[in-house]
Amino acid sequence: MSVTHDARIQVRSPAATAQRPAARTWPDINNPAAWIVAAILLIMPLIANGFFLIEIFATTLILGTIALSLMFLAGYGGMVSLMQLTIAGFCAYMVAVFGVSGNANISLGWPWWLAVPMALALATIFGTLGGALAVRTEGIYTIMITLAIGAAFYYFTNQNWAIFNGHTGINNVSTPHFWGVDWRADIPFYYVVLAVAALCYFAVDYISRAPFGLALQGVRDNPRRMAALGFNVNAHRVAAYAVASFIAGLAGVLQVWNYRQISPGSVSVGACIDVLIIAVVGGITRPIGPYIGALVFVLLRTFALDFLVKIGLDGNRFRLLIGLGFLAIVFWSSDGVIGLWQRWRQGHRPQSDRPGGGRSHG
Amino acid sequence: MTRFVERHPAWALIVIIAVAVALWLIFAVWPPGLEEAVGRKRVFLNALFNGITLGGLYFLVASGFTLIFGLMRNVNLAHGSLYLFGGYVGYAVSASTGSWILAFIVAFILTALVGVLLQVLVFRRMEGQDLRQTMVTIGLSIVFADLMLWACGGDFYQIQTPNWLIGPIELPLLTAVKSSGEPVYLRYPLVRLVIFLASVIIGVAMWLALNRTRIGMIIRAGVDDRDILAATGVRIQVVFVLVFALGAGLAGIAGVVGGTFQSLSPGEDIRFLLASLVVVIVGGMGSIPGAALGALIIGLAEQLGSVYIPTYAIVVTFLIMVLVLALRPQGLLARR
């Protein structure tokens, strides 16, 4: 019993609860920073060139959305799932299988407006089934089982040639083209990604304050009491997996359109763990965290090589840099970059107020 | 044993029938109809032996993992890195000195030292916070993986099998009878058998040490209730360090074994971490017999699966895990 209690993520930091008003109707409506960020994101195509627009910002938003689905499960449900990228990858594969791609003998050639809902539905079912399996266990076991599911999917895609086309994957996936607009051209695609990311962000923010989200947070904090109050604890958890799977699936669709191909390499175990790193580095308590984490991760991934070479080190040590940064964050702030920023804003708080500083139920 | 039969007569019957069928498959000469249906007996026996010996390797990795978890509730997702580290150390030692036995000793000592450092520097600071431990060890495994890639490169290494273990031996198992009536016996690599035997001996020794000695009693008491044990005056931190050293050292030994059986390369750390996760989920967390049973099941499933249903081999392993979770979420041999 003690294991399961200890393992539940401790996200309710005093700082976070004190800052947040008890009831809000619309997120951050009085926060000027949020308006500035929104404005910058909207006029981004005027500022940034194609490389920045797609390689940095669209990729950040896609990865951030996958990490957002993990944040939703971990932050509100207390379930750390490492299979969110697997669900996104599954959805991406399904888009490629049902839609049009270069592999004519695998792809069924449906138009995108049929293939995408089908892929989303299948990905949601897949994620919900995986979740139904994972909720049988708690805490650290959840991590292990979802990691095992992710690994099994990776090896399966590598070996299966009938549907997943083995380790070459599926190439030349076609992207939507209607109303005279090529939606994969840089600027339209950026807006599509931005719209989906914003939709997911506000949906998660809304759910967290809706009765379902509040019940979910109650289940996270004290499942026994919630069960005694008449809530079906496992049903809430499985439903949370369904919501998170849908969000991850949306990101998966965007991912396959972005690269126009999907292969086992993009659902590898390392990539699954990267999603956890992104969510944790950004901050797992609030929906904005994953996007911040994703931005840090993408910037590091893109520029670490140049940076390391410039200061005279081996450029290939990018993962070392990420790993060390991740370690530092986990060691000193379990609330990620957001937590660091909040603490910095509130000046030097006493040591005992450290968020996540090891509250334990024994 | 008798209690199990009394409690679950149906399961006992199924187990007895399965064992009987397995024994018949191993010892009898296959009738031609069966050979046509599933292939040659030599292939089956080879897959069977590969599975069992691979299970021995998995047991070495997973037993250290489960021992550390069982006593200390420390989730060490850097266990795969310890495996790979042990393998590289073993390779370096055996390549420079030519001694295979020395490779085991040095790998055990060095990985045990790394384990002690991990326990003192990392885990002691975050006792009882499983999730932070998980995250920190994931971070550590990324850092270790990159450091090892830096030091050893992306090549494949294989540890040289010593001369006295090279070559197959003939086992007294019939694979077929030639048309001339001459029996054909199974030939199998000696080194794998020796290593399997060694892992059985290590497993039995561990079981005996845990169940028949005073230090084993202390460890088992610690698994059940740490605080009371500490209150009785046992220096529990010392016990923790010793168990961590043993668990890590076992991973190091397994690395040398893995480097001899198979090969060492970046990525093996994650593979063996996952294997030990699946093994302990199937067998039951914190249980040494559970690790042995889980390792045997997973090893057999992987090898038999890769021979008879190559595309779905990995799915079979996964299905076993799902089945176990559905029927006994705590694992096959967990006590709860």
Image: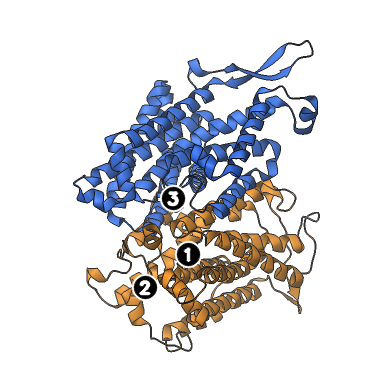
Chain colours: A orange, B blue
Q: Secondary structure at mark 1?
A: loop
In front of the other: A297 or A113? A113
CB-based contact (under 8 Å), mark 1 and mark 2: no
Q: Are marks 3 and 1 on the same chain?
A: no
Tell me the chain of label 2.
A
- The C terminus of chain A is located in which quarter? bottom left
Q: Say if A275 sits above or below B193 in the image.
A: below
Residue A239, how many percent across, how many down?
57, 71
Tell me the chain of label 3.
B
Q: CA distance from mark 1 to mark 2?
A: 15 Å
N-terminal-most mark, 1 or 2: 2
Q: Is residue B149 left or right of residue A173?
A: left
**Which residue type does callout 3 highlight?**
Ile
Residue indicated by mark 3: B142
Q: Is residue B235 left or right of residue A237?
A: left
**Which residue type does callout 1 highlight?**
Met
Task: Name the outermost residue toward the left.
Answer: B233
Q: Say if A272 sits above or below A223 in the image.
A: above
Residue A12 marker: 2
Residue A77, how many percent across, how many down?
47, 69
| Residue for point 36% across, 71% down | A339
Q: Say if A219 sits above or below B50 in the image.
A: below
Q: Say if A112 sits above or below B153 in the image.
A: below
Q: Secondary structure at mark 3?
A: helix
Residue A79 marker: 1
Classify residue A51 by image quadrant.
Answer: bottom right
Q: Are marks 1 and 2 on the same chain?
A: yes
In front of the other: B184 or A100? B184
Residue B91, how many percent across, how many down?
44, 29
Classify residue A357 by image quadrant.
Answer: bottom left
